[in-house]
Image (cartoon, rainbow, N blue to C red):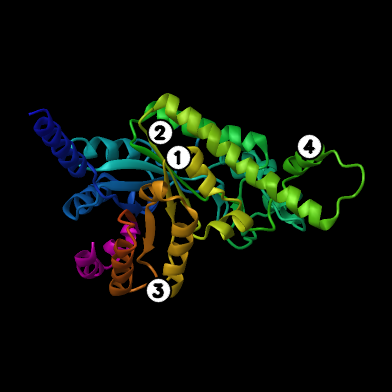
Amino acid sequence: MVILRFVIKFLLTTFIYSESKQDIKAIWVVRDHMVSPHLIDGIIEFAEKNNFNHIFAQVRGRGDAFYNSSFVPKSNLVDSNFDPLHYLITNCNNKDLKVHAWLNIYYLWSSPKKPPQVDHLFFQKPEWLDRNFRDEYILKNKFLIEEEIITIHKEGFFLAPTNPDVNLHLISVISELTQNYQIDGIHYDYIRYHSADYGYNKVGLSIFSELNNYKNKLSDEDFDRLFLDYKNNSITKFVKSANLEIKVNLPNCIISAAVKPNIFNAKLTFSQEWDLWLSAGYIDWAVPMNYKTDNDDFVQNMYIIKDNIPKKFHDKIIVGISTYNQSPRSAGKKINRLKRMDFSNISIFSYSTMVKDPNYWRKLKRYF
């Protein structure tokens, strides 16, 4: 009888666990769709109807807010009396839909036209902007005196992770959100440098010099090694600090980060030590944006992850698949390949494709 009871208990526990363990099916919703009740209703209807269970809703795009904040300027796309994030959360209650506040962390501005809000960080804190070594345009704030069109380098303007005031501000942004909204998750995007040659914010560079206290000139090799470590540590310290703040305010909040899929390129080029963030518990999920259209390139990225991330963390990896740059069949084949590699958690980028071309989802759905 004792053995029988044990077997029954074991089988029951296994059944309950298997029933409760649900594959993660997430979708990114870009901020353009977070501007009105009607559009948000469409998001919820689509997600619920098509078996998505997590929504990454962009509520911080370019240093602005798609929610009510006491210090972050609201997006000019949103009516001042409307709170998109609150509306989304409220209307997802009692549904099998988790809402993650998707935040562009260090990405500040990308348009050749200046921000419409006078209290935007672009105007208020130009000393917080990151730059590459030769960039006099940002160093001397030349963009502030241009009346109409400003110069955009590659993706645009980024905040400097090496400037401590930047990270304190971003912690305040996250703290306000997690105190005022019952969100299921915080999702970081652009939690990186613009590119490998960035990181030369004036304040950040001064701190680096003080930390290393070198009297003799460093060799190029020593400088590159020390500077890369410094850049990496600046972001990792932020991720660690943000984790502590979030978990105090919302203990069950899922912290995730959209990251470059090749862990070596992520670290060396963008200072994303996401394998460390995951193993240290600073984030709960890593969401590698494996947007490669070529199947071999896509699979290669997955094998790098599989071979270098311990297996116990594989269920914390939600693989990002793109729809904007490939056919439904191509995206679907990648979903099938992930399943064969035992990666069953996915996120689709993005909902915009489904709105633009409803036929796309009808073709992709059978792989989902």
Q: Which residue is mark 2?
A: 68
Q: Main secondary structure of the magenta part?
A: helix
Q: CA distance from mark 4 to mark 3?
A: 45 Å
- Regarding mark 1 in the picture, which secondary structure is present there? loop
Q: Position of residue 89 (x, y in %)?
A: 28, 37
Q: Which residue is mark 3?
A: 295
Give yes or no for contact between labels 1 and 2 (Cβ–Cβ under 8 Å).
yes
Name the residue beneath numbered marker 1.
Answer: 74
In the image, residue 62 lies at what x, y percent?
51, 48
The kind of secondary structure element at disc 2 is loop
Question: Magenta span covers which residues?
Answer: 347-368
- Mark 1 Cα-neighbour bin, 10 Å: few <14, some 14–19, many ≥20: many
Graded by Cα atoms within 10 Å as few (under 14), some (14 to 19) or many (20 or more), the crowding at tag 3 reads few
Mark positioned earlier in the residue sequence (1 or 4): 1
Q: Which residue is mark 4?
A: 211
The Cα–Cα distance between marks 1 and 2, rounded to whole angstroms, is: 7 Å
